Amino acid sequence: MRAQVTGSAMFDRRRGSHSFTYGAELPVAVSGAKLSRHFSTLDRQLISILQQDGRRTFAAIAREVGVPEKTVRRRVKELVDSGAIQITTVADPRLFGFHMIAMIAITIDPGVPVTEVVGSFLDLEAVDYAVITTGRYNALIEVLCRDSEELLTFVDSELPARPGIRSAEVLPYLDLHFQEPSWEAAQSKPRRAPRGPGLALQPVDQQIMRVLHTDGRMPFAGVGQAVGLSESQVRKRVSRLVDRQAMRITAVVNPRHLGFDTVVWVAIKTTRERRASDVAEELTHLPFITYVAITAGRFDILAEAVCRTAEDVMRLVEHDFAQVEGLADTEVMFCLDLYYEAINLPGDSIAAAGAAIAEAHRPH
């Protein structure tokens, strides 16, 4: 989810749970299900801490994990340089002008390879996410549009051009209610603070977020140099964006590398006795839930859960969902393969300046 699309799209192998990020520096990659990586105990500790706060100081991390600061600094650099993680920004797409987001649920003709059909969507600028699923649908495709006219163009022009599609249901988002890019945090959640009023970004805020996407740990002095502000002004603006939940700075990594091997989407119908927004809010407090959208169409809510095992899914369905009032029906779709697409935002010159400054600040 992002704003105006420019430049070519690239696939991001590091993400597995769904959350909004963007940028030009992500490598071309295959889908997450085909990847494997070994992380040491220290790596896992570092990633968990950086997912909670991507800018936490190396000194503070070293104290928490009980190793020398230089060891932490070196290992984080190795994880970033190898592409195992990216320390970047996660934000709400509506802040960048994407006011029409939809999940398109598709079924594919028998005999047509699902991977080929899904792969044909990944070069389209409106598509930021695709997943091959079990159940009623063969795949879910998320699209980001500025308005309903752009969505109509996608449905009217792009969908019919994909061979092999038997049917497609458009589920427009009425509210992107929740996203949690840290899967460790999603396992057991404290009660989160309610969302505050919407925050209108100033252009310089968007510029700061673009620069920090390139390197979420870039010194604020470097960010200021890229956007024309002082270090203290950047620090205050970043603090405000984070405090108002407009942005998170986090380590992005494929959850399967951390043992979260079972990703599911849950399509939910609610009862008339309870508001969908209240049900959605209660879902955000359940273990494993990482993404919640209130939708129009056949379903009222779509939720993503990132689990370690099928037993976790059973617990979610039989125990946790049973505690939520207002659920009329649920459909669980297991994700067989995940695809992510990173698309550039306007202001590539800002991102390029940020990348150059990031490289200048990188220890060699």
Image (cartoon, rainbow, N blue to C red):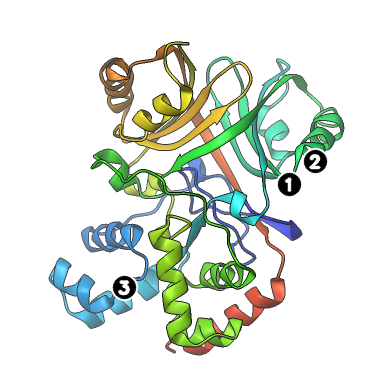
The spot of residue 320 in percent (x, y) is 28, 22
- Secondary structure at badge 2 equals helix
Write the residue at 61% across / 49% down.
94
Dividing the picture into quadrants, the one containing residue 153 is top right
| Most foreground residue, 142 or 326 | 326
Mark 3, other Cα within 10 Å: few <14 / some 14–19 / many ≥20:
some
Q: Amino acid at mark 1?
A: Arg
Q: Which mark is residue 146?
A: 1
| Most foreground residue, 113 or 167 | 167
Q: Which mark is residue 150?
A: 2
Write the residue at 68% across / 34% down.
118
Determine if residue 66 is in view: yes
Whether residue 215 sits left or right of residue 124 in the image: it is: left
Mark with earlier residue (3, 2): 3
Whether residue 178 sits left or right of residue 313 in the image: it is: right
Q: Which mark is residue 75?
A: 3
- CA–CA distance in space, label 3 to label 2: 44 Å
- Secondary structure at badge 3 equals helix
The spot of residue 108 in percent (x, y) is 70, 20
Q: Are marks 2 and 1 in contact (CB under 8 Å)?
A: yes
Q: Is residue 362 above or below residue 115?
A: below
Q: Is residue 93 above or below residue 133?
A: below
